[in-house]
Amino acid sequence: MLRKLAPTSKAAAEIDGLTIHSFLGESRKSSKKKQTRTFRPGDTKLENEWRHVKYLIIDEMSMVGLSLLARLNRIVKTAKH
């Protein structure tokens, strides 16, 4: 299975995917007090979301900042443990 993410809603719509921020459960224009989804090993919902995912496509990768990419990496590693 393939998961498609993009940094902007327009790019996500073009590839029929999700924005990275919406997948992470946060608003791109959130205030300094970030409302983030908590992921822990053994998180059944997270594991179910990623169980059959073999490939991850990130459209417009050059627009993705290092900290956002690092958060996404931690989540995927937790889900695919």
Image (spheres, rainbow, N blue to C red):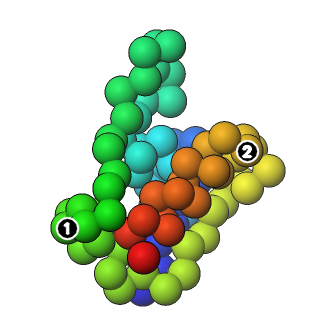
What is the three-letter code of the residue carrying label 1?
Thr
Q: Quadrant of the N terminus?
A: bottom left
Residue beneath the point at 50% across and 13% down: 32
Which of the labelled discs sits on residue 58, or is there none?
none
Mark 1 surroundings within 10 Å by alpha-carbon count, few (fewer than 14), some (14 through 19), many (20 or more): few
Task: List x then y, in percent, for residue 37.
Answer: 33, 41
For the residues labelled 2 and 1, say whether their Cβ atoms are less than 8 Å apart: no
Cα–Cα span, label 2 and label 1: 27 Å
Nearest to N terminus: mark 2 or mark 1? 1
Where is mark 2, residue-wise?
66
Q: Is residue 60 above or below residue 9?
A: below
Q: Quadrant of the C terminus?
A: bottom left
How many tags in the picture?
Answer: 2
Q: Name the residue nearer the viewer: 38 or 8.
A: 38
Residue 81 in sight here: yes
Q: Is residue 69 above or below residue 56?
A: above
Mark 2 surroundings within 10 Å by alpha-carbon count, few (fewer than 14), some (14 through 19), many (20 or more): few
Q: Is residue 56 above or below residue 21?
A: below
What is the three-letter code of the residue carrying label 2?
Leu
Task: List x then y, in percent, for residue 4.
Answer: 51, 67
- Furthest residue to the left? 44
Whether residue 44 sits left or right of residue 8 in the image: it is: left
- Furthest residue to the right? 62
In what element is the residue under mark 2?
A: helix
Where is mark 1, residue-wise?
44
Residue 11 in sight here: no
Which of the 4 image quarters holds residue 56? bottom right
In what element is the residue under mark 1?
A: helix
- Furthest residue to the front? 41
Whether residue 57 sits left or right of residue 53 in the image: it is: right
